[in-house]
Amino acid sequence: QGSELSGWAMGRWTYEGIDLNHNFADLNTALWDAEDNDLVPHEFPNHYIPIPEYYTFANATVAPETRAVIDWMQRYPFVLSANLHGGELVVTYPFDMTRTYWKAQELTPTADDGVFRWLATVYATSNLAMASEERRLCHYDDFTRFGNIINGANWHTVPGSMNDFSYLHTNCFEITVELSCDKFPHASELPAEWENNRESLLLYMEQVHRGIKGVVRDSATEQGIANAIISVDGINHDVRT
């Protein structure tokens, strides 16, 4: 139908009426409450935060699609991810949920803010539409002032986002890419949209080679150690092998 005949909410909700973009478990609140009470990381983890019991109940409002994605994330140790949206030209990075619960917008960085800003910048600066000198505003937000990247919560709060869940429940760093001003491009426009994003997608995937990588081994047996916790001084977010 294209944008002419489709409202912004077209296709947003599942058949069951669930918005998948807000459907993941809220792990942020538990972490922040624990931080406020000086329980992190000695009594409450700063990573691999468990899913709350209420979320696992059969009558919980959790879409089967969401449960399937969580199962997928738990089976495979992803380290880098992006989810693709439309309707704006900007790359957002966690946290997506504001720390002050009653605020609609608030800068809410993660412990790995520098890495997330780098990942978002890699995508934004290589995206042909975002980097164009003829770039115009999609709506009323001028993201060009920030290099076409923004902390998700500083744009608008999204409790239960996949970005925040990935970061807090797994080793995976995830961003959101708003691909185009047009939320519903016509089929004839798709080749141009692909060209706008092709190099960005490739460069983004290449970022898995940045940072420290290797195998943690038992010094006696040389066998790899699963679930070894790796901490970096000054970063209150560990990762696991």
Image: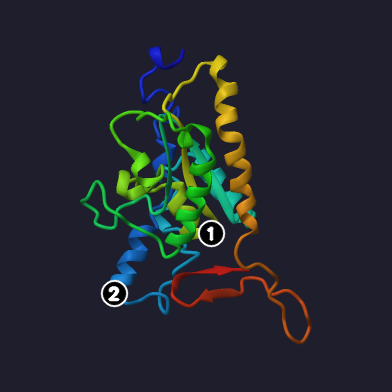
| Dot label at residue 170 | 1
Measuring from the top left, give residue 160's x and y in whole percent.
39, 48
Q: Secondary structure at mark 2?
A: loop
Evaluate if marks 1 and 2 touch, with contact meaning CB atoms under 8 Å apart: no
- Farthest residue toward the front? 133
Q: Is residue 235 left or right of residue 36?
A: right
What crowding class fits label 2: few (fewer than 14 Cα within 10 Å), some (14-19), or many (20 or more)? few
Q: Which residue is mark 2?
A: 37
Say which of 227 and 59 sits in front: 227
* In this view, 123 is above or below 234: above
What residue do we see at 36% from left, 59% from top? 109
Say which of 69 and 58 sits in front: 69
Give the residue type that dot 2 points to.
Asn
Image quarter of residue 188:
top right
Measuring from the top left, give residue 27's x and y in whole percent.
40, 58
What residue do we see at 41% from left, 17% from top? 3
Whether residue 85 can be seen here: no
Image quarter of residue 198:
top right
Count of numbered marks: 2
Measuring from the top left, give residue 241's x and y in whole percent.
63, 68
* In this view, 201 is above or below 70: above
Give the residue type that dot 1 points to.
Thr
Q: Is residue 168 left or right of residue 72?
A: left
- Farthest residue toward the left? 102
Q: Which one is earlier in the sequence, the residue at label 1 or at label 2?
A: 2
What residue do we see at 62% from left, 48% from top? 205
* In this view, 238 is above or below 55: below
Whether residue 154 can be seen here: yes
Q: Estimate the spatial distance between the alpha carbons at disc 1 and disc 2, rounded to whole Å.
A: 23 Å
What residue do we see at 37% from left, 65% from top? 31
